[in-house]
Image (cartoon, rainbow, N blue to C red):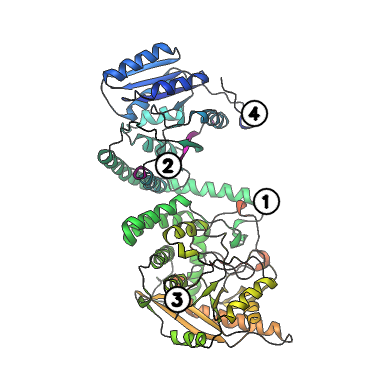
Amino acid sequence: MLTPPSDLVESVPIKLALVIPNYNHSAAIAQTLAELAQFNLPCYLIDDGSNDETRYLLQSLAQTYPWVTLLLHPYNRGKGAAVMTGLRRAYRDGFSHALQVDADGQHNLADIPAMLARAQAKPDALISGKPEYDESVPKGRLYGRYLTHFWVWVETLSFDIQDSMCGFRVYPLAATERLLCQQALTERMDFDIEILVKLYWQGVEILFQPTKVIYPEGGVSHFQAVADNVRITKLHTKLFFGMLKRLPWLLKRKSQQQAVQTSDCSSATQSTSATHWSGMKERGSYWGIKLLAESYRFGGHWLCRAIMYPVICYFFLTGKVTREASLDFLRRVQILEPQHPKLNQPVGWRDSLNHFLAFGNAALDRIDAWCDRIQLSQVDFPDRQVLAEQLESGKGAVLLVSHLGNLELCRAISIHQRKVKVNVMVLTSHAENFNKVLKQLNPDSTLNLIQVTELNPATSMLLQQKIEDGELVVIAGDRTSSNTQGRVMYAPFMGQDAAFPQGPFILAGLLDCPVFLMFCLREQGRYRVHLERFAETLKGPRAGRMDRLQQAVNRYSERLEYFARCEPLQWFNFFDFWRKDSELQRAPSHLVQPNPLPTTSESSPIPEQDHKTDRTQHS
């Protein structure tokens, strides 16, 4: 018998049997049973109405291996029916757990000890394999799985189920039997999805064990591309409406999980809301964002938008901290603009949801721009000549930007022209998943990245050379960094002092060149670039240096507020912007709550700066 590692076991014995459904799998079943013999586990082998050749083979194998019990279906009922037959028989025979193994040789049976160790440590949980595919996987099946994963995340309001289609699982039989007694589940290929979602709905914890999965050459698959995809589509429709009925309970469960996580974080740090934004980990898995990108590749902007909206709604429903930050900002705008045409009276959850949706739309517009589907001619830039004249002088300039609007779109469109070089300070540790997928859509999206972690002489010399070569240096000035505590300046913003970093303004002074403000906002269905001269230079004598910095920060804050009040739904700082710098906790990212959305750019000023450093054209 197997002996799980001692550090994983809580001295809770489990009694386990194998369950193997089989329908006309004659090529690999003998080898599968031969490899399973070493584990000395009772096995229920279900013949799901196989042909005569396979039926005779299974009868022979059952006689060869005394630990195999052969169960017969007189006709083919489907994989789900075969698995349920095995699970229910194992439960009636007194087993506490059942390990489902497919008969086609796809599963790596060497991972069984690790899966049983997880089951021994967590006997009430369902342990599922998390497939790691090699090149043998059919691409159509692979992308189809990602689409199913997305809908399962929607149906559970959670990313807890990392894979819903792997048939390599350890079932806790008591909980499974309760479900099967209460509900009639589907009996075909959609069974694996349905039982996992419904066990999750019943409160069963789902844990995952990475496992290699191969598609053997010449292997037989009974997945019917049309019929089974129709079944799965119908299942997801049913599960979606089932989720709506359970919505209050699922939200309560999510809230309780977040409360536990927050409590765990508090034992090491102060509350999550006091954590600095740059210490937060982006939310949303790589494969979830990859699914959106593939949807964009095959169906364009509108298919991607249709898939994205449920995701945004999920983040809105479950992101309490970021939702409250959104409402706080919008209410501040309404105090200053009581009759704002883009906000309800009073501001409520619908405004915050629109705020989240605007963020998602901006992200899709960035993808459109990087894939050259939005042209520079579609962006209004009335003051373009002002910047062009500066560059014609042979000397570059600094562009002070922010996380208001969609300046990334302007940068992405311009890169296709390759006439003017633009260097954007970047903190690449945030938005890593989004940037990774964006690079696959367009490798130009990460051209000439310069990651800045500290302002040192080498950085200054590098950027000074860029200015002398007639290039642009872009710096975001609206976010403090995780290591700028004490190096901030406070300025009035939306009726209350907010912390702004010193770094961007110090760097602009060191570069001794003209400084411009730039905002790119969506107005009346089109993007419009607002450019205005900020200063001929921020350099000056040492005497009065702090006063000059304060004046520059005050002016930046004033212009940022003006444009934010004009377009409040395009303010993409989803955190408490007014929290005092001294109150923030710069905690390690694994100890804190995640950001609200799979972000497209997370920036902090010098020493940690915004987005990627690239080349773009603004003239």
Query: Mark 2 sits on what residue?
Result: 135
Residue 456 included in the magenta stretch of the image: no
**Residue denoted by label 1:** 268
Query: Element under label 3?
Result: strand
Residue identifier under label 3: 520
Q: CA distance from mark 4 to mark 3?
A: 58 Å
Task: State the CA–CA distance, disc 4 to disc 1.
Answer: 27 Å
Q: Is residue 266 above or below residue 63?
A: below
Q: Amino acid at mark 2?
A: Glu
CB contact under 8 Å: marks 2 and 4:
no
With respect to residue 374, does 437 lie above or below?
Answer: above
State the residue in front, 103 or 7. Answer: 103
Nearest to the eye among marks 4 and 1: give it: 4
Report which residue position mark 4 lands on: 6
- Of callouts 2 and 4, which one flags the residue occurring earlier in the amino acid sequence? 4
Give the residue type that dot 4 points to: Ser
Lower position in the chain sequence, tag 4 or tag 3: 4
Residue 218 on image: x %, y % = 34, 31
Mark 2 / mark 1, whichever is N-terminal: 2
